[in-house]
Amino acid sequence: MRRPIVAGNWKMHGSRGENARLIEDILGGYPANAGADCVVCPPSVYLQEVGRMLRDSPIALGAQDTCADAHGAFTGEVSAGMLKDVGCKYVLVGHSERRLIYRESDQLVARKFAAAHAKALIPVLCVGEQLSDREASRTEEVVGRQLDVVLELCGPEVLGQGVVAYEPVWAIGTGRTASPQQAQDVHAFIRARIASRDARIAAGTRILYGGSVKAGNAAELFGMPDVDGGLIGGASLKADEFLAILSAA
């Protein structure tokens, strides 16, 4: 049985004081014997400090991005080995904001996935379509292409050691959310796409939904058979909301 994951992506939010209060509140209300894995992904400048706060806790540390190269003259970049060195267990790759704002290609995202795996991090591969793609019935074409590039570079076994997160771009930070059935349809497509390479690995791959998940809609979304938790944006910055979503998972 696939163990759910709830991962909080703080994006470019927080300060030392705000981070300390948020972590204190989350740990203070953390459910005993939680049936889901929990991850928080603060901005890179706070990774080491937040990691110290999480020491000996059930919450894992994740990063929001990594460089595709292991080392070298790449000013401003942070490698997967560096993330591992400061205590990260997970790292997001290919978030829609990285693809759209910073023009990251499918090929670069696949290289980042491979780089993270090579350093024993768990990469969370983000895939998803824009509103224009959905309206033109291109959701499966776009998501399939993003997934296939990673499958071709890394193979299904390596992909299965990571996590996939479906994030419809039109539902991120907009207040719009894919219906549970819309989410399930795409998650089932993703699982079938992986199964076309290896059915056993597909059955065990955890696929998260990311797109305006809140306490009020989490249980219904997570109740879908192929939805294995959530990649949470704004709601991860509010301890009570984040804990309610974790409980739903």
Image: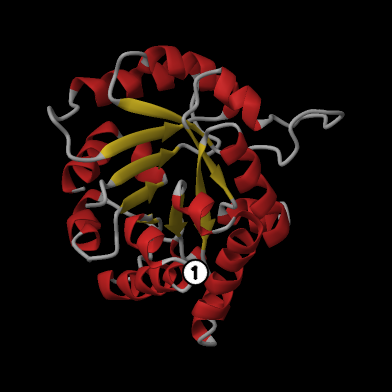
Q: In this view of the protein, which residue sits in the foreground, 156 or 18?
A: 156
- At which x and y percent is residue 29? 18, 26
Q: How is the image coloured?
A: secondary structure
Q: In this view of the protein, which residue sits in the foreground, 203 or 183?
A: 203
| Quadrant hosting residue 118 | top right
Instruction: Give the residue drawn at x 40%, y 44%.
Output: 234
- At which x and y percent is residue 133? 56, 79
Q: Amino acid at mark 1?
A: Arg
Query: Does any portion of residue 105 appear in the rendered image?
Result: no
Q: In this view of the protein, which residue sits in the foreground, 30 or 118?
A: 118
Q: Which residue is mark 1?
A: 197
- At which x and y percent is residue 220? 19, 62
User: How many residues crowd around disc 1 within 10 Å: few (fewer than 14), some, or many (20 or more)?
Assistant: some
Residue 91 versus residue 113 in the image, above or below: above
- Identity of the residue furthest to the right in this view: 73
- At which x and y percent is residue 63? 53, 33
**Relative horizontal placement of residue 24, taking residue 73 as reference (left or right):** left
Query: Does any portion of residue 246 appear in the rendered image?
Result: yes
- Identity of the residue furthest to the left in this view: 32
**Relative horizontal placement of residue 67, taking residue 195 as reference (left or right):** right
Instruction: Give the residue drawn at x 31%, y 44%.
Output: 5
